[in-house]
Image (tube, helix red, strand yellow):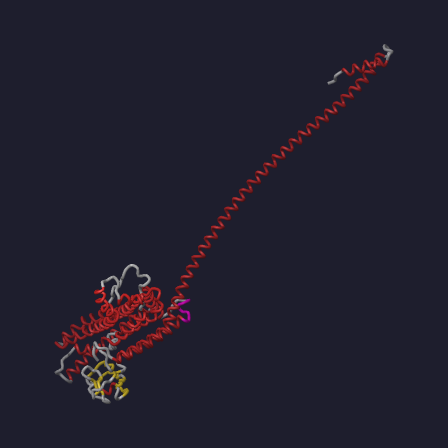
């Protein structure tokens, strides 16, 4: 048993032992261990990645909600503004309508008053004529024999009278 | 909790180590004094006996009592065929001949008639290596089964998984991936086997009274040559082109470089692996045994000096022991890492080697 020279028996047994151990461990240990470690690592990495993704998605949804809310607020403001404008327009229109209506009524009323006044005046004229004739008749019955001539004269007079 | 248990084991190992070795060398001392008084204490012989392989597990000798475990001797002779017998047939000192075989001066088994004989004995290195490997296989297949069942995949790892897992991920992330690039998965089983094969034998070799398996050229040669085979099978045409026609140098230089490059690949790289592991482990064992022997060298002068020096010697031994535990891991790592580096060099280049030639020879 020399210290430096390799001994045949030990070489032989070491070689056999190493090869057996290598194949046994390769089959029953290393493959499973490396696969297990790899699976765990990918699993953890995937979990972290998916968590990160969910986080991003939540942030995105939050942003979207924010945008939706802002849009809704703007729309509401626009609607309110429009409603106000419509209201004002309607009021103005109503006012205008009322004014024109009132004016028309006034004009109509004036026309009717005028008409009735004219009718009344005509009536009064006639009445006055009649009364004048009657009065004149009564006054002049005795003085004037020619009745038709007198009436004409009176009518003429009556026509000349302007009552207004 | 594991760390605490580990500490207890260490303490136990140290106490065991100290008792065994002191008994051993004291006993030898006593036996020398008792039987052959003229024989002096020879630390070199004792140390060499401890670090070399043997055909039996010899623990200590007290008087005429030999605490040994005989191991099977398996011999093959072209003339006599296969013969298997116990090493106890050679006698306690290996002085007797059996079946036409005997020990020579270097404790090698030779045939008495001088014919060639091939020794495939289960020596103490072989037996200890097999025991260590059975433990390794049981441990690793147990862990593999746990991963198969999903423990450590979908749930937290348990027990030994926690101890082995960082080592495996270390080999994967710091040895295989940086050196082997995309092909790392292919070499992982080999690298892991080499790493744990060396590590467990290093650690078993540190148990007091055990065999020095990794500090043996036969053991390291097998691993070195297997690594060489793996390296050679990983080579590509670019690698061989660099060796047989190194680019960028004049032709006379090429002619000088070719044998050097070829030698570097076929001899220097595996030899570096083989010698490094062997020398480191042997050196560690020699230092520890030397510190212990110092006690008996002083003791041979006067008893008082021996006793007086023992605390210093023990303190140094404990210190070296811790370093040796570190070295057990470091050497396993270095062997694996250099194998990975050499494999990486064998198939690198060709496609991504545009920035010149970085053929730094790592030995």
Q: Position of residue A14 (x, y in %)?
A: 29, 77
Q: Which residues are magenta?
A: B148-154
**Image-quadrant location for residue B267:** bottom left
Residue occupying the point 78% across, 16% down: A159
- A102 relative to B215, above or below: above
| Horizontal arrangement in the rendering, residue B308 relative to residue B330 (left or right) | left
**Image-quadrant location for residue B16:** bottom left
Question: Does B87 lie within the magenta span?
Answer: no
| Horizontal arrangement in the rendering, residue B34 relative to residue A43 (left or right) | left
- Residues A78 and A11: in front is A11
Residue occupying the point 26% across, 89% down: B80
In this rendering, does residue A63 appear at all?
A: yes
In this rendering, does residue B321 appear at all?
A: no
Name the image quarter holding the C terminus of chain B.
bottom left
- Residues A82 and B273: in front is B273
Q: Position of residue B103 (x, y in %)?
A: 21, 85
Q: Main secondary structure of the magenta part?
A: loop
| Horizontal arrangement in the rendering, residue A125 relative to residue B247 (left or right) | right
**Image-quadrant location for residue B65:** bottom left
- Residues B80 and B123: in front is B80
- Residues B55 and B252: in front is B252
Task: Looking at this view, name the residue that lies furthest to the front.
Answer: B251
Name the image quarter holding the N terminus of chain B.
bottom left
Residue occupying the point 13% across, 80% down: B40
């Amino acid at each position: 048993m020399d210290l430096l020279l390799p001994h045949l028996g030990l070489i032989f047994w070491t070689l056999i032992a190493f090869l057996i151990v290598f194949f046994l461990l390769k089959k029953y240990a290393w493959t499973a261990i490396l696969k297990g470690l790899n699976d765990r690592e990918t699993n953890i990495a995937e979990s972290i990645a998916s968590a990160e993704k969910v986080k991003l998605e939540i942030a995105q949804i939050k942003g979207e909600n924010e945008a939706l809310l802002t849009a809704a607020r703007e729309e509401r403001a626009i609607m309110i503004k429009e409603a106000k404008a419509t209201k004002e327009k309607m009021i103005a229109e109503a006012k205008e309508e009322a004014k024109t209506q009132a004016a028309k009524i006034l004009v109509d009323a004036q026309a009717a008053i005028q008409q009735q006044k004219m009718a009344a005046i005509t009536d009064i004229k006639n009445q006055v004529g009649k009364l004048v004739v009657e009065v004149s008749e009564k006054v002049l019955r005795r003085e004037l024999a020619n009745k038709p001539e007198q009436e004409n004269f009176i009518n003429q007079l009556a026509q000349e009278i302007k009552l207004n | 909790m594991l760390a605490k248990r580990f500490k207890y084991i260490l303490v136990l190992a140290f106490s065991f180590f100290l008792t065994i070795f002191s008994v051993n060398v004291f006993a030898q001392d006593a036996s020398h004094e008792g039987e052959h008084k003229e024989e002096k204490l020879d630390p070199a012989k004792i140390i060499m006996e401890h670090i070399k392989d043997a055909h039996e597990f010899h623990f200590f000798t007290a008087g005429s009592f030999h605490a040994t475990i005989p191991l099977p001797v398996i011999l093959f002779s072209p003339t006599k065929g296969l013969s298997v017998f116990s090493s106890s047939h050679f006698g306690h000192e290996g002085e007797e001949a059996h079946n036409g075989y005997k020990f020579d001066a270097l404790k090698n088994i030779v045939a008495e008639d001088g014919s060639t004989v091939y020794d495939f004995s289960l020596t103490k290195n072989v037996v200890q290596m097999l025991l260590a490997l059975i433990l390794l296989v049981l441990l690793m297949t147990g862990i593999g089964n746990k991963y198969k069942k999903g423990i450590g995949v979908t749930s937290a790892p348990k027990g030994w998984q926690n101890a082995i897992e960082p080592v495996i991920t270390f080999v994967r992330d710091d040895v295989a991936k940086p050196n082997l690039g995309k092909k790392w998965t292919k070499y992982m089983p080999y690298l892991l086997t080499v790493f744990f094969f060396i590590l467990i034998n290093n650690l078993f070799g540190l148990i007091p009274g055990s065999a020095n398996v990794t500090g043996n050229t036969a053991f390291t040669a097998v691993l070195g040559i297997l690594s060489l085979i793996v390296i050679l099978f990983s080579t590509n045409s670019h690698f061989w082109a660099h060796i047989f026609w190194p680019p960028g140098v004049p032709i006379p230089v090429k002619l000088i470089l070719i044998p050097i490059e070829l030698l570097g690949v076929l001899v220097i790289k595996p030899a570096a692996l083989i010698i490094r592991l062997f020398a480191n482990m042997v050196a560690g064992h020699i230092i520890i045994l030397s510190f212990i022997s110092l006690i008996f060298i002083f003791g041979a002068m006067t008893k008082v000096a021996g006793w007086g020096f023992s605390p210093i010697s023990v303190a140094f031994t404990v210190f070296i022991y811790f370093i040796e535990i570190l070295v057990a891991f470091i050497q396993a790592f270095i062997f694996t890492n250099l194998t990975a580096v050499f494999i990486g060099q064998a198939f690198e280049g060709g496609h991504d080697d545009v920035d010149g030639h970085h053929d730094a020879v790592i030995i």
